[in-house]
Image (cartoon, rainbow, N blue to C red):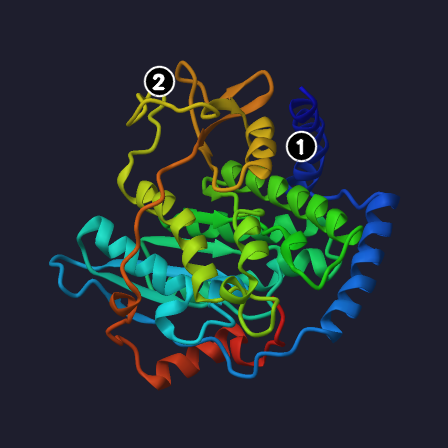
Amino acid sequence: MERAGAVKLQSERVKRIATAAVVGGGGVAGAGALFYGLVLGQALLARKTIPQVVSPPPRANGLYGTQFEGPPVRLVVLGDSSAAGYGALSPSETFAAAVAAGLAEQLRRPVWMRCLAVVGAESKGLPPQVEVALRQHPDVAVICIGGNDVTHRVRIPTAVRHLVRAVRVLREAGVEVVVGTCPDLGTIRPIQPPLRWLARRWSRQMATAQTIAVVEAGGRTVSLGDLLGELFYAEPDRMFSLDRFHPSGAGYLAAAQAVLPTVVAALTEPAPVAGAIAAPARALAAGEGVRALPQAAAEAAHRPGTEVSAAQVAGHDRGPAGRWAQLRRRVWHRLPQQADRTPDRATDRAADQATDRATGRAAEPADR
């Protein structure tokens, strides 16, 4: 009962934040400003103990699943260092490579993948990435963003407005969009209690607001949250990269496993048809089902690995509490072994350099 009450309270609070993010205005209350100040101070102290990763993220662009026939599915990956694979030691260990290889295996088709994510990017950095992405004529885009917005004191409404614009532009071009929402910054070991607990709370509020806004804009979300928290605490040497801040290849693989089923669903499941009642592809498990979107978003933020997408009830998109949304916890697909996640390079160095200039990727600092 206590947990349910906390979810309901957060649902109402973030509904107001997300509404402000979509329509404009809104701000951070005094407690939020204090939180940001504390997190900034803690972050400055923590970063003194975090060694920098010298090399940039490995290049994972290319064609995956060359053993399959048919026209390639075109995938773009956008966002910050979590999407770029910062800290991974080889292309096959990056988040983007794992998603691309897994998608090829699940669809039994080749997948052409382009990673446009920029290390250190905030949500306001998405427009150049989206602009370059649209030139690739993608079928689906995966976005991971939000951590830098929290640590850099960006207001939630401001951050979410930038994300919404990116999702809308992609959807208007016919691109399916899956967003991995803000991770739980409380899992980062150099951030100590009590600031760790505050970081966790603010990360969840960012993730909840992102979910509401993204689903309203026509995309799907997967909550990452502290999905990897227990593993990171139990096996930090394996799950973290050398900087103890970014995930290792094992950490990126786990995140890709969570996102992949929703990417597959976005490409294979028909969208709801007005006036029809869509039957679920499988029986719903405990905790799944249709909710008002704010409630669904709050539940997802408290239960990592949860997908939220638009739904209909009796042919209606909206109910008394707003848009309907579907919660699902899809089965994590097994991903190919690392050796099978090495891309067949379909781009050359000149193309990579042109992309770097267009997105600002090469000039960004070593942040999330």
Give coordinates of residue 325: x percent, y percent. Answer: 48, 28
Quarter holding the C terminus is bottom right
Q: Which mark is residue 275?
A: 2
- 318 vs 329, nearest the viewer: 329
Within 10 Å of disc 2 (Cα), the crowding (few <14, some 14-19, many 20+) is few
**1 or 2: tag closer to the N-terminus:** 1
Give coordinates of residue 322: x percent, y percent. Answer: 57, 23
Within 10 Å of disc 1 (Cα), the crowding (few <14, some 14-19, many 20+) is many
Image-based side of 192 in relation to 336, left or right:
right
At x 45%, y 54%, the residue is: 255
At x 76%, y 57%, the residue is: 192
Specify the amino acid type for callout 1: Lys
Farthest left residue in view:
69
Q: Which mark is residue 15?
A: 1
At x 63%, y 70%, the residue is: 367
Quarter holding the N terminus is top right
